[in-house]
Image: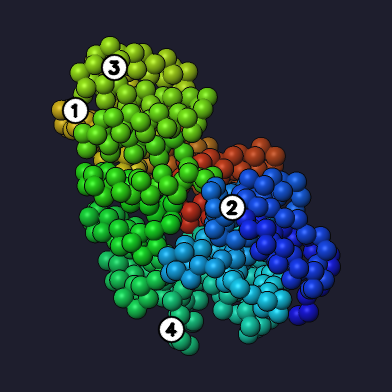
Amino acid sequence: MKLNLTSKTILIIEDYPVMRKAMKGILHTLGAHAIVEAEDGITAINAMKQQNFDIVLCDYNLGEGKNGQQILEEARYKKLISFNSLFIIVTAHQNARFVLSTIENKPDEYLAKPFNAQQLLMRLEKCYARKQILYVVEREIEQGNLARAIHFCDQLIDQNNKAFRSQLLKIRADLAIKTGDFDKATSIYQEVLTQREISWARLGTGIVAFFQSEHEQAITIFQELIAQNPMLMECYDWLADSYQAIGHNSDAEETLNQATEISPHSFFRQKKLALLAARLEHLDIAEKAYKAVSNLGKYSTHQSPSDFSGFAKVYSKNNKKMEALQTLNSMQQHFPNNQEAELRAAALETEIYQKMEDSKLSEQAFEKVQNLHHQLKDRLPKDLQLDIAKACYLNNDIETADKIIISLVHNHIDDNTVMDNIRHMQSSIGRENSSEALIQRIRQELININNQGVKFFQQGLIKEAFAVFKQAAEKMPHNKTIILNMAKITIHDLKSSGINKENLLLAHQYLKRAKQVGVAQDKIGNLQLQFENITNPQTS
């Protein structure tokens, strides 16, 4: 397709004025006129807040401040670029680590310097041809309309456009996994693989095996794929998840460690490694990973106070008390006037000062914990709640600590990682097995609730089933199993009773709640698909 740039708005992000001028000159020769320049990440983000750009040409290395990858992350996170905009990373780096890092973040295109007008035009035309074909599907995915996305994707596949058939099949398989339709995903992957070996299709068979709890099979697929293509970074993440699913945490850690050696610039992978290594008490690995998280997060929109507090915990366990306190101080500077950051710092400071035998500063920190906890207790992440419980135990406030633990167990009994973290924390302060009876009792309580609710549901007693789960939700407002079952019942009620304003709002409310508490994507996606097909039947 012949691309006309006359009407396109373009943003050039480049720190070298000479290079900016050269890129602008190239664009002028291609007919572009509406060109905005930015020399750094702050200017670029501000420009994207002011107007929508059709094309963004962004250098990877911008000196001090955000790099191109971090600008892309923030622009997507804050929805500063639309699904039909082009974001092209431009770089002189040919180093495999930089290339892998860039590709992993999935820009629309990757363009190596130097380039001429013809090379740029060819890339732009290729991108726009793809965007034009996939527009209707990506629009619906962006808006969260999975049923409509599937409907349009199937239509495009039926048109048998050979140039884009592979991409469409990949998108359709991804949508099938998101909606829990594993048979459809498997049939697509097998169709592709019977024609030729393609890594995304082979990876997909492993992902399906993972979601169907066939973890040993998934591990074999991912291992074989990595042996054939050691630069397929997504595969390492799935392999690590599969190892963790069967309790092989050391193998998961080794896999993530290997991946970060190959591609060290992934913020989320480094964070995942840091958390896992810290749990396993492999403090040197955890410290190294947290240093990477700190460096990568410095200009990232994804950095949070928990990154600093996690790093400080590792320092404290490694008996590096001053480094731990310095890290907490850095957190408060990085997140000024942030009560969560203040509470995280105070909870850890009371423990660190106890280790330093400074009872006065420890008591002052704990007093701050109590005050902030009283203000924020309904809005705290579960890892911070556990830190507060530990601080309370260390300061002999057993009643408050036990209340926090009871709440955590009620709300997260179906999350084995949270339960293990509770056990580990209590063991670290000499309270081994103190919550084990509680965990087993609440687990059985949840099983009984689930059995009772499901029994009512199977008997067609929908109101009674809903009442059982609603009563349980009042006691366990963040429990995934309870919220998921309430979402299922409300969707079923829509199917059986028909649509009215009350049950429509209720179904939407519990779907949203299921996402918030972290119910698995395939389960939410399946319910969302049912919801869309009920409310918009022409796509079913």
Tell which circle, 1 or 3, labels the residue nearer the N-terminal end: 3
Q: Label 2, on which residue?
A: 71
Tell which circle, 1 or 2, labels the residue nearer the N-terminal end: 2
Q: CA distance from mark 4 to mark 2?
A: 35 Å
Q: Residues within 10 Å of mark 1 (few under 14, many from 20)?
A: few
Q: CA distance from mark 1 to mark 2?
A: 43 Å
- The quarter of the rendered structure image containing the N terminus is bottom right
Q: Quadrant of residue 163?
A: bottom right
Q: Label 3, on which residue?
A: 362
Q: Label 4, on which residue?
A: 197
| Residue 534 makes an appearance in the image | no
Provide the secondary structure element on which disc 1 rests: loop
From the top left corner, tell me how far across and down residue 277 is, in percent.
Answer: 27, 48
Mark 2–mark 3 contact, CB under 8 Å? no
Residue shown at 75%/46% (left/top)? Answer: 50
From the top left corner, tell me how far across and down residue 159 is, in percent.
Answer: 68, 81
Mark 1–mark 3 contact, CB under 8 Å? no
- Observer-side mark, 1 or 3, equals 3
Q: CA distance from mark 2 to mark 3?
A: 40 Å
Q: CA distance from mark 1 to mark 3?
A: 16 Å
Provide the secondary structure element on which disc 4 rests: loop
Q: Is residue 83 left or right of residue 374?
A: right
The amino acid pointed to by label 2 is Ile
Q: Residues within 10 Å of mark 2 (few under 14, many from 20)?
A: many
Q: Label 1, on which residue?
A: 429
